[in-house]
Amino acid sequence: MDSGPHDGDLVAEAKLGSCTAFNLLMQRYERLVYRISWAYTRDRDDALDLTQDVFLRAWEKLGTFRGEGSFRGWLLCLAHRTGLNRLRSRRRTGQRNGLATGDLPCCPADQETDLLRREEQERLLEELARLNPRQQLAVTLRYFERRPLRDIALALTCSEGTAKNLLFRSLDKLRRGLLPREREHHERMPPLPGADEKLAGG
Amino acid sequence: MSGCHPYRELMKNWLAGELEPGVPPALVEHARTCEDCRRILEAHVALETIALQIPEPASEDLRVVREEVGARIRRRAGVAPRSFLRELGALGRGHPLLAPAALAGLLLVAVLAGRWSAARPADGPDTWLRQIEDQAAQRGSLAGFWDDPVLLANVAVRPQPDGRLALSFDACRHLELVVPAGSPVAREALLSAILDSPRLGMRLKAMQLSPDLRDPGLAEALVYTLHHDPSLAARSEALAVLARYPFDATVREALLVTLRQDVAVQMRLLALEALAEHRVSRETIERTIREAGLQSNPAVLQRVEQLVAGS
């Protein structure tokens, strides 16, 4: 955990317009926000750009943070949402993360595997951005910050047992979120009885 | 999901990182026949894969991001608390040559007043220097700068191996303005140094100079430093300076908060001494000590007895 001023004090100062306080908050969480940003962009420059966007949005929206949860949780939520928006906008413009610069494997079979894997990871990130803030915080701290369960429980202000259950439920939710589209993707529904004949008959 | 129950606890512990890194064999065996559990494991592996690929960001990159965000925040919200610098920045945006011209004017004034010295760099000139560099980078030429004799006389030029020239605007680093202690410029400079300077020495110096001004804004900056500065020396200086201010409600509250929550016992004792010196009642001090959970700290209790025994 960080020593120094509490997040709550810094947020209160920043709400009053203190750039110094906001700068301290940025220093505290910039690495974590960068990691999340990188996961959504797969590129150093894009991740830095997204990190900048997240902090600018955080500054703009600071007035909406009412201090009901932790600032870290609120910021992570914002980072995931901003990342998701970036992912969608790239999809609209036809770019794919990390694949636009020609880093595809040479072999076509490998390319296909790589594409599928990345698509799966993108869908996972989309689902992650849809989790509730506490679940997002648990998953982000566990995987992107590699924090032990004790720290996750502290951040969530709950017992380690509760944190463990929350983490499990989050992964279960991610799994369920992925399931329908995967089925749609990989498993073809069996044709209705007689459908082929109807089609053949015109 | 039937038959999963015995494996759920195992999976929870493993996902929470409480077991050995490899997937427990019992879980592998179960996942072969249970699609739901297998997919949870797959989600875990996918997250691990993403996390492992993330490179560590360079500190320099993050510093650039911070500076850019800070600059945009100040521009967008007009938050720039240092009005003196803001006015100069506004000048620079008005016309590319106005900022250098303003700087040249200031330098000229300083030269005429015979006030040159090898003083330490100030935050203001550093900001102006950056503005000049930005202007120069945008223009791609420094023709306008060379026309000014003051700047020309104080810019060091070094040829580079590739034929370009390195320009050192050292002139800015030797600027000294002599202004009345109570003037807005002095106030802004002190505020800037106390709140924004990364150098501890500068923060200490600025705090030492501030008691003469008796300014509410400076008092606020001192309170902020007292509660938030990571350096014990800075917090201690802020407390010493505040204790010399008129003992009003702001100072009293700041000292009580320090007694209640500062991480260093030394700071709490200093706050205690200052409160006792200003004859804050024993009840208030004892209540604060109880709130801070210090009622069993023998050093604090002994000091209370020594300082406020007579109240």
Image (spheres, grey):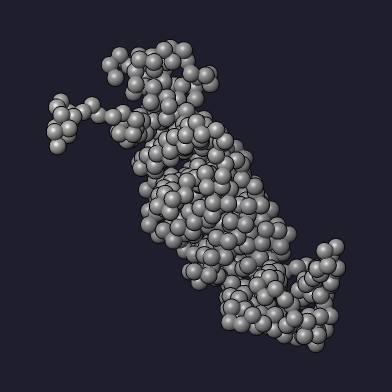
Q: Is residue B84 left or right of residue B103?
A: left
On screen, A202 above or below B168?
Answer: above
Residue under the image location 49 percent in, 25 percent down: B17
Q: Position of residue B175 (x, y in %)?
A: 77, 76
- Closer to the camera, A54 or A101? A101
- Please state the horizontal and vertical placement of residue B290, each as a whole percent of the image: 48, 43
Vertical relation: B135 (above or below) A147: below
Q: For the N terminus of chain B, give its image quadrant.
A: top left
Question: Measuring 50% from the left and 31% from the top, which residue is drawn there?
Answer: A109
Tell me the residue at 61%/62% (across/down).
B195
Q: Visible in this render: residue B75?
A: yes
- The answer to which of A144 and A65 lies nearer the viewer is A144
A117 sits to left or right of B144 = left
**Residue that protrudes farthest toward the bottom in the picture:** B112
In front here: B187 or B115?
Answer: B115
Q: Position of residue B270 (x, y in %)?
A: 63, 51
Q: Is residue B7 left or right of residue B55?
A: left
Q: Position of residue B163 (x, y in %)?
A: 83, 67
Q: Is residue B22 left or right of residue A165?
A: right
Which residue in the rendered view is the most extreme toward the front? A201
Give the residue at x 56% y 47%.
A101
